[in-house]
Image: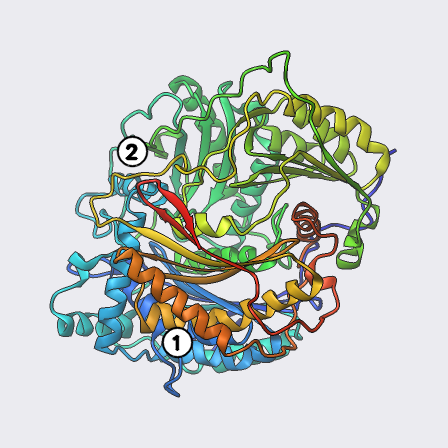
Amino acid sequence: MAYCMARPLLPRLPLTRRALANGAQGMVARDRSLTHAHLCITVAAGYLDEPVAWPGLAHLLEHVITTTPLADGSHGLVTWCAEQGGTLNARTDDYLTDIHVSLPPQALADGAQHIAAQMAAPTLRTDVLAREIAAIDTEWRARKHSASLQRLEAIAALACPRQRGSGCRHGNAATLGGDIEALREALVHFHRHHFHAGRLSMALLGPWEHRRMLTLLEAMAARFSPAPNGAPPLDMAPRWRTDRRAAPAPDGAPTTLLWPLPAPLSQARWARLAELAHALNQGECLAHLPAGVSDYRATLSPSGAMDTFCMTLEGRVPPADGERFATWLSGRLNALAKAPDGASSPGWQPPSGTLQLGPAWFDWARQQALATRLAACQSQARSAVFTPSGAYWLTATRRDRPRPVTEPTNDTPPVERLHWSGDYGVCHDATALAHTPWAACFFPHMALCLAPLATQRLAQAGITLLRGEWGQGSWLMTVGSDAVSGMLRTLAHAQPVPAETPNTLLAQRLLQRLTTAPDRPAIWTSHAAALPSLDEAVVTLARRLTARFSAHSSTPRGASSTDDAPLSVAIMHTLRLPGTPEQRWQLARAEQQHRAAFFRQAREVAALGYVAAVRRGDGAPCSLGYVVQTTGEADATARAVRTITQGLWDAGIAPSRATPAPPETAFAALVSQWQCLLSGADTPLHRLPDTAAPNSAAGRWHTHWLDNAGRYWVSD
């Protein structure tokens, strides 16, 4: 039986744009159901605007703004937002620097003013500068072999050698250390000439009326000065070298094409380019792809090459086939560039498959700020014509996919499964799901290689495919009127492979271990009639796994010991409880109350490392983890983490009115319930009544260790 969607799962939200004080730009959108407002403050200045003598200066300024104590002498922005039950982060890119925050509405006005004050007139204390240089250096050493920094280096190889951003601008102790007073003067000069209202864009998504949100943005903009005399214009210096083609990519490595965007570029054309990227990702270009492509991704304004339209092709792409595809895509881009401006689509439309509105809104806000900068580029105007010869071909490191697991032998043991059917209350979180089918499958200790272009082919059929990979296994979910058939097609052509350690920070890998997952395949579907067919497909696929992999390997795959820096170690102190509703609430309150205090004591006071976080694994059992990543002495760091943690619990867990935020989208509601079922519980915490719990840390405490040589161990 087919079911129809009652209404779109991701509706378009009304949007208002407004010119603000001193030349700033503002945008607001409203969703009445939001329990957190999402604010992004963007300055059109990034590492390509830095002086040549100070690589990493823009990144350092971002760190200083977010960690320097506020005017009342209390904590920095990161700590203050955590104390209010919100989150704050920042990013420095090639042409933009932004601070983005999610806050409960009752804390939004104060938080917005604190952020504006710090950005408009930061206090550049030398002690904070020294501390943040050390943090940036530790971050650089931990990330310098990562895929993201390798990609930035590859992009830099396509830049003109004399271009000031032709090298990696992350910054480290060698580029930022030395004369601290000279560094401070450089920061003062950079801030004065770039962090003014003429380069400022603010975007707020919240539950308030548009007029009220615009009034708040107007007050924030008033804190910033107009552009000072002698400030550089918004123009962007010539970036790309004349020889457009890098060395051929290794066989099987991703092929990336970058088309520099024309400047100036109007908002209407920018919007159409964004719509084209979305249409391509929904399968529009399937008939034109080279035969060897297994997956692809179109991106407008990717990080590190924000002034480009990017297409990344996975698989083996012969040069001739790549040229033909580049010719076709150039034609599509060129048609948009030549079309009359017209009117942009009203409102803001979250991309298909969006789980949380905050990250999607922040990405869109950055794009809008860059569009404003490109629209102002008059003296460095580029051709408005996209051609195959105008594309830059980015060399990438080859990524070998794990080999599929061989076929099972005759003595393959029976496959035990877990089954759930029904909505388990997700319709209370998202009424659009009342008539929308879904199907979800989980496979422990393995990952899945999907058939080529599986996501895009399902999108053409109106089915959204969501997927996730943990250290404990991987899951798939299809959502749409034909979700079950889509899942059956996906499983029929999927290949099981051994799970790999994700290429993330050591601390992030440890935090993944807080997630509880079953040791057997699991199935969840909205309608019980679909269970037999899904069960058969899951059993067939699971039997192809001939050997079980330990969920906690002592030597994680993918670990690297090539770093010439001191050994980097992530240390996590965890509390584990059986997971009654009372205990789940106890850990939720502890996470909320300890997040800011642990960050301040570990990161700012004890300087244990540039990572300091508290995270919760919800379910039955439930767990709470306190993690740091350091290049310092590991035993001393572990003792310090345990001491800080003990002090936090000795102070007690106070009652709190704050509750976990409900999912912001229908897709997030499904994923939240799915992860709850997999973790051994039935009801997500946000739908449980807040219950009192014993104010104690009685449970099992362990300390987890993971270093960049691949060693992992646990101690009591």
Q: Which residue does the image show at 67% across and 60% down from the upper left? A: 13
The answer to whether 207 appears left or right of 526 in the picture is: left
Q: Which residue does the image show at 24% across and 60% down from the upper left? A: 50
Where residue 197 sits: x, y (%)?
A: 39, 74
Q: Residues within 10 Å of mark 1 (few under 14, many from 20)?
A: many
Where residue 158 sits: x, y (%)?
A: 27, 39
The answer to whether 526 appears left or right of 339 in the picture is: right
Q: Residue furthest bottom?
A: 72
Q: Residue furthest top?
A: 410
Q: Which residue is mark 2?
A: 244
Residues marked 2 and 1 touching at CB (< 8 Å)? no
Q: Is residue 663 placed above or below 534 in the rendered structure?
A: below
> 152 or 629, which lies in front?
629
Where residue 648 sits: x, y (%)?
A: 47, 74
> 591 or 76, which lies in front?
591
Quarter of the figure that contains the N terminus: top right
Q: Residue furthest left?
A: 179
In which quarter of the view is residue 283 placed? top right
Q: Which residue is mark 1?
A: 76
Q: Is residue 336 placed above or below 133 in the rendered structure?
A: above
Q: Give the SS element for disc 1.
A: loop
